Image (cartoon, coloured by chain):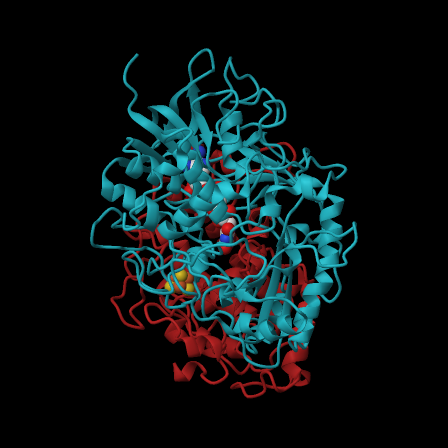
């Protein structure tokens, strides 16, 4: 058999794929191809000195889907619980570029708690959901957390969150807080909560060759300064400089190719930047396209050996889609906030993730709470739900920019088998691929939980002196659903020890295909109560380390932290 | 509305709360009421230039800036349609004491977008990382060349699917479960037919053309539902042309940002710790 082109081919350069590419090529010396369908927005990526960026403080570019999933060429079909039908359009879009979703994200990077990995043993079964424990212990994640935080560059304050698991110092001190967040801090303290600096993948000081953040407030469009630690400007840049990585941007993978027996993958088929079909062969394949796009590709890769889709003998590929149940409110104040100044979130509380003393058996676990939030004027002003004839009434006082802040809770949603990604039978994207068809409905517990904590969040805003809190009363959670879209994509290729009830083994390897691994949020068996990216990165590091040294994974982590 | 299928969801993710798109779960009416309340309270906004107590804000502005809608040389539309477009954006975001879309020349923004492919590098994505207004070189003016699929996306948006083979996947009626039928119309055709219709309706009402109508009548026509113009599309573009970066053609002399007391782009200087955490002490003029 001919020698494969690469040792490893990775599909997707987001948080998961970027970290895996670094570990395998830089630490493992493997010849790696990183296949990314989006563009490279960093013109000098791989240059030892220059650090360019095509991003700027430009709302129009962001609205025009620069380096982001564009629904005109890559629409999705999804179940609209309000309309009770499938619709075609934009849902759960993330960055489509080198760095994936880590380019436009806020960089909120908390670690999980021990509890997050033990949902079933801590809280028991939930009817209508398949709650399980993770097939690993929290302690296993710690060395990977430490190393990923150093690689990406996380700011934070050790010991400030009393509910966090024990940890060492952060690579960087916490940066300055913004007014939008500060306004809630005293109120939260008064109510007995514990506000602390949000751990964030944004430089508070010059770090590993990248400048400190200047708090321009445009994180959502991508960082002009490279102060945010996207995997593009951290792991992927390091790997390109090291020399073992081939970056194949503007190349869309369309199929994972397998030996006729189906036991082993041989590589991937892709459509290159000119529209030509190509094959890249490799000894190992990593899927890191995210928890919607990875199952899509697996289902598209059906073959005579994998009739229901790659590694889908269990029929579970695409199932247990989770988004997190978010509940957000906005608050108006009499004093100036100017929430658009600064990083998006600078303060958080974790009080609702742990059971308070005296709570009964019916206590519902909430989630990590972000204090603050921001908005720029075009995004707000063009909101089509706003009747245009009142436009100036809204824009001139500038309420939303000047007097408004927000609170958002990110809570665990239930793993429900019927929530899933399939292939749409009719709609195709620009590459001629069937688009994902997404069905997601909240579990009744998610609604009860959201309504319970809504009141607690409202109390913080009221205590902080807000003159108006919206929504004024909790809305029906079903109604709220598509108005409060989480961008956290989890589940769909869940990991576990039993091939009948999971898609991947505890290391992220497909049970049915020995050389295909998943390195995105798809492997999460339950969705946990915290922002996912840091943990996805730690898990990707762990998977890649296992590929290099099974049984001795942590030895892959360099001792020399100047590496 | 055809375009709304794709645009519905764009609107949801504004208030940036990490995971969430924002929440206009808040019904728009409730939000407007809250803003109006705040505006009327005086402490919030009473000291802004041109600010009037809410009770005095007429539903339709009384002044008629339509008569001196600035007309710049159109690049894409015919002069007649450009005149109608200027009158349209002016009616959507009128000058009610502070400059609106007419002063921002938002029509130039729209016209520039419709003709984006007339330039060597299509004027879709401005360059980075800085505008040059706060130091550093002006990178915005050097537009970013489009990739193959980006070009297709923007040709479909502007020109529509138009029977072109490689655009057929984006037809409205692909997939039997959707209500819409036919080719996806592009912005250009929608503006051309919509503007012609506005002119025709104005003529039917005894005016020379749409731009000849007083702004109150233009607004009434747009609200009546009688016009075929996709008002929502035009409104989004009017907002973009008024408050977006001037490199795209609108927001002339930054009037849009000045009108709403917004600093705009800030790279590479950003905000200091004090400006970030104590905005009351330091308004934009102090930056
Ligand atoms: C505005 C915003 C703010 C956010 N803030 C936070 C935050 O603060 N903290 C947090 O934890 N999360 C945040 N998120 C969510 C976070 O971005 C995602 O959870 C994360 O990016 C998912 O990582 P991933 O590696 O699974 O996939 P992605 O980031 O989606 O990366 C997958 C990559 O694969 C590429 N790809 C997909 N299919 C193919 C294919 N067939 N061929 C080639 N390439 C392909 C995609 O283009 C993409 O670049 C935010 C999201 C948004 C939109
Ligand atoms: S706020 Fe900081 S990290 Fe975010 S885009 Fe601006 S400089 Fe970059």
Note whether A396 is above or below A433 in the view shown: below
Q: Could you tell me which residue is drawn at 40 percent across and 41 percent down?
A: B152
- Number of callouts: 0
Q: Position of residue B131 (x, y in %)?
A: 32, 66
Rendered-image quadrant of the C terminus of chain B: bottom left
Q: Can residue A250 be seen in this view?
A: no
Q: Can residue A163 be seen in this view?
A: yes
Q: Position of residue B181 (x, y in %)?
A: 60, 38
> Which quarter of the frame holds ligand 2?
bottom left
Note whether A84 is above or below B8 in the view shown: above
Q: Position of residue A242 (x, y in %)?
A: 24, 41
- Of A525 and B275, which appears nearest the observer? A525
- Of B1 and A125, which appears nearest the observer? A125
Q: Could you tell me which residue is drawn at 53 percent across and 56 percent down?
A: B18
Q: Could you tell me which residue is drawn at 51 percent across and 13 percent down?
A: A305
**What tint does the image give chain B?**
red
- Of A146 and A543, which appears nearest the observer? A146
- Of A549 and A253, which appears nearest the observer? A549
Q: Quadrant of residue A259?
A: top left
Q: Is residue A61 left or right of residue A444?
A: left
Shown in cyan, the chain is A
Q: In this view, does B155 lie to the left or right of B90?
A: left
Q: Where is residue A477 in the image (x, y as percent from the top left)?
A: 73, 52
Note whether B17 is above or below A492 in the view shown: below
């Amino acid at each position: 058999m001919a020698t494969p082109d690469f040792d490893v081919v990775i599909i997707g350069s987001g948080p998961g794929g970027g970290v895996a590419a670094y570990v395998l090529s830089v630490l493992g010396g493997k010849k790696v191809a990183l296949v990314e369908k989006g563009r490279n927005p960093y013109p000098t990526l791989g240059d030892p000195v220059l650090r360019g960026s095509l991003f700027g403080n430009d709302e129009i570019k962001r609205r025009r889907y620069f380096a982001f999933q564009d629904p005109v060429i890559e629409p999705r079909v999804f179940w609209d619980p309000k309309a009770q039908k499938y619709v075609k359009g934009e849902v759960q879009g993330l960055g489509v570029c080198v760095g994936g979703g880590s380019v436009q994200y806020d960089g909120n990077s908390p670690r999980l708690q021990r509890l997050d990995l033990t949902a079933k043993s801590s809280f028991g079964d939930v009817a209508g959901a398949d709650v399980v424990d993770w097939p690993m212990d929290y302690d296993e994640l710690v060395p990977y957390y430490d190393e990923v935080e150093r690689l990406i560059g996380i700011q934070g304050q050790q010991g400030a969150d009393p509910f966090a698991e024990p940890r060492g110092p952060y690579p960087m001190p916490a940066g300055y807080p913004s007014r939008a967040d500060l306004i809630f801090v005293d109120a939260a303290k008064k109510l007995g909560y514990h506000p602390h600096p949000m751990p964030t993948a944004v430089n508070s000081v010059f770090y590993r060759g990248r400048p400190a953040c200047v708090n321009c407030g445009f994180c959502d469009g991508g960082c002009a300064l490279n102060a945010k630690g996207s995997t593009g400007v951290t792991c992927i840049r390091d790997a390109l400089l090291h020399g073992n990585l081939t970056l194949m941007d503007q190349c869309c993978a369309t199929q994972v190719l397998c030996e006729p027996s189906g036991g082993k993958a041989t590589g991937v088929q892709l459509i290159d930047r000119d529209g030509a079909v190509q094959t890249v062969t490799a000894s190992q394949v990593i899927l890191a396209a995210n928890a919607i796009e990875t199952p899509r590709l697996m289902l598209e890769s059906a073959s005579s050996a994998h009739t229901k889709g790659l590694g889908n003998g269990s029929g579970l590929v695409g199932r247990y889609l989770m988004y997190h149940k978010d509940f957000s409110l906005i608050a108006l104040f009499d004093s100036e906030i100017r929430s658009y100044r600064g990083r998006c979130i600078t303060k958080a509380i974790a009080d609702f993730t742990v059971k308070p003393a005296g709570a009964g058996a019916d206590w519902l676990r909430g989630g990590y709470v972000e204090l603050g939030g921001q908005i720029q004027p075009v995004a707000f002003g063009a909101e089509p739900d706003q009747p245009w004839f009142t436009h100036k009434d809204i824009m001139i006082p500038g309420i939303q920019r000047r007097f408004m802040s927000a609170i958002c809770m990110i809570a665990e949603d239930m793993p429900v088998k019927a929530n899933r990604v399939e292939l749409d039978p009719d709609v195709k994207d620009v590459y001629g691929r069937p688009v994902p068809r997404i069905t997601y409905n909240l579990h009744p517990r998610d609604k009860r939980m959201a309504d319970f904590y809504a009141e607690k969040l409202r109390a913080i805003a009221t205590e902080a002196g807000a003159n108006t809190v919206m929504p004024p009363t909790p809305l029906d959670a079903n109604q709220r659903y598509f108005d409060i879209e989480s961008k956290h994509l989890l589940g769909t290729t869940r990991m576990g020890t039993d091939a009948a009830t999971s898609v991947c083994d505890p290391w992220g390897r497909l049970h049915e295909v020995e050389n295909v691994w998943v390195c995105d949020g798809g492997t999460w068996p339950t969705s946990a109560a915290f922002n996912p990216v840091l943990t996805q990165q730690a898990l990707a590091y762990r998977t890649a380390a296992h590929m290099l040294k099974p049984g001795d994974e942590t030895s892959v982590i360099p001792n020399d932290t100047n590496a | 509305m055809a375009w709304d299928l794709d645009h519905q969801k764009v609107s949801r993710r504004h208030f940036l709360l990490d995971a969430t798109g924002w929440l206009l779960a808040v019904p728009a009416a409730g939000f407007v009421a809250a803003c109006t309340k705040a505006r009327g309270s005086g402490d919030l906004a009473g000291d802004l230039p041109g600010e009037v107590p809410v009770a005095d804000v007429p539903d339709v502005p009384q002044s008629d800036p339509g008569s001196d809608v600035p007309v710049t040389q159109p690049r894409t539309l015919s002069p007649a349609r450009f005149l109608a477009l200027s009158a349209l954006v002016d009616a959507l975001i009128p000058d009610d004491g502070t400059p609106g879309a007419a002063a921002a020349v938002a029509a130039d923004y729209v016209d520039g977008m419709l003709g984006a492919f007339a330039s060597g590098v299509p004027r879709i994505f401005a360059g980075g990382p800085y505008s040059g207004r706060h130091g550093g070189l002006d990178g915005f003016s050097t537009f970013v060349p489009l990739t193959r699929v980006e070009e297709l996306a923007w040709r479909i948006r502007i020109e529509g699917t138009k029977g072109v083979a490689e655009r057929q996947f984006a037809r409205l009626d692909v997939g039997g479960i959707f209500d819409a039928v036919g080719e996806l119309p592009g912005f250009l055709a929608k503006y051309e037919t919509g503007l012609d219709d506005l002119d025709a309706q104005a003529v039917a009402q005894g005016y020379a053309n749409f731009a000849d109508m007083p702004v109150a009548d233009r607004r009434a026509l747009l609200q009546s539902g009688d016009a075929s113009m996709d008002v929502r599309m035009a409104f989004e573009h009017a907002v973009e042309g008024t408050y977006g970066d001037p490199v795209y053609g609108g927001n002339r002399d930054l009037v849009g940002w000045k009108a709403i007391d917004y600093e705009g782009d800030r790279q590479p200087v950003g905000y200091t710790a004090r400006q970030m955490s104590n905005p009351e002490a330091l308004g934009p003029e102090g930056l």
